[in-house]
Amino acid sequence: MLSFFLFKLYRALKFLKFLAKMSCNCPVTTTIIVGVIGYFIYKKVFKLPTIRPKPEAYKKDYKKDVVYLYQFKRTRKCPNLSPFCMKVEVFCRAYKIPYEICDEKRRWSRNGALPFIELNGEHIADSDLIEMRLRKHFDLPSLSPAQEAQSVAITRLADNHLFNLLIRYKIQGDEFYNVLVKILKLPNFLVPVVMPLIRGVFGRKVYKKSTMAIGNFDPDDMKDVLYRDLQTIQDYLGDQKFLFGDKVTAADAAVFGQIASVIYPFRCCINDVLEKDFPSVLEYCERIRAEIYPNDFTI
């Protein structure tokens, strides 16, 4: 990492020297170029990254102790294309937390992402942090210390590793992009033009982020890694109704969010994998769907 940083710095300084030579006959131009490039180097290399300050609440007339959940718009066959939006909503429903969906206007969190919530005027971003804040605020019951540790581990498996595997399968076919275009409500005449652009830009960006998070794999290797994640979930589930007994918990919300956002909006190869090799995981998702979303979407 250090050698990469030094290499980048060397290249930037070398380029700066080149520009200075090119504009040596004009001191004003040289000063402007040096200043602009110097600022760019400072911003990209030396300035420490910081998080944006919390914005003011969008909901000015909020109700006390009501969670305002900002997320992407629903789809017909699934509550949300985003596994993290679904995770937060499942958590709220499982623990009977009063909430309202806010998706009429596209709002973004301080992190530039969705979901986020507002609770009594406070902006809270990141699904894990949301869970922690809601647990504390509503004094929700906890599992045993050992089970809580296992719950966190399963949640990390789902939200980090499994997510970055499933998203690659999700973007391979046209079905995901077709649903995405419907959510955007683009005019029909623009769809043939915009679709290749979305596939190229969005698909490439998602793939790059995924490989940075968990590495790159050949198709067969990626299948092996996916199977290990699903086998871990199936083995831990065993004969239980849900991961920690008869009630949906935070870990169930995370696992269901990841899998449901792939198998319900459209059919893809993950449906075949679950039906053939992990029927217990598929049945488990069906139980959560029936428990949490009995009337919200159809298959």
Image: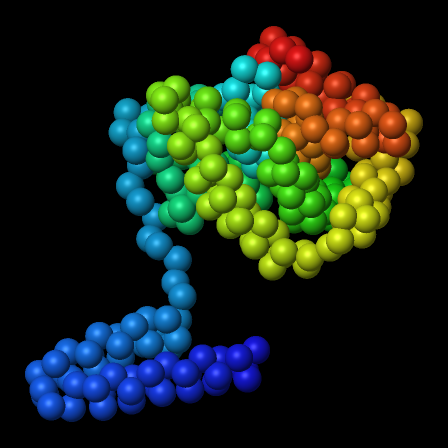
Q: Percent position (x, y) of residue 2?
A: 54, 82
Image x and y of residue 47, in percent: 36, 73
Front-most of residues 173 and 37: 173
Q: Measured from the top left, where is residue 233 in percent x and y?
A: 81, 38
Residue 291 sits in quarter: top right
In the image, residue 266 lies at what x, y percent?
A: 64, 23
* Residue furthest out toward the top: 295
For residue 160, say whether it is visible: yes
Q: Quadrant of the C terminus?
A: top right
- Front position in the image: 68 or 64: 68
Q: State the residue at coordinates (53%, 49%).
A: 204
Q: In the displayed structure, would residue 98 be above or below residue 172?
A: above
- Residue drawn 80% across the image and 52% down it: 221
- Give residue 45's quadrant in the image: bottom left
Residue visible at 41% across and 33% down? 194
Q: How many marks?
A: 0
Colouring: rainbow
Q: Is residue 153 left or right of residue 206?
A: right
Q: Is residue 34 left or right of residue 283?
A: left
* Residue drawn 72% across the image and 47% down it: 157
Image quarter of the N terminus:
bottom right
Inspect this view and state whether residue 72 appears: no
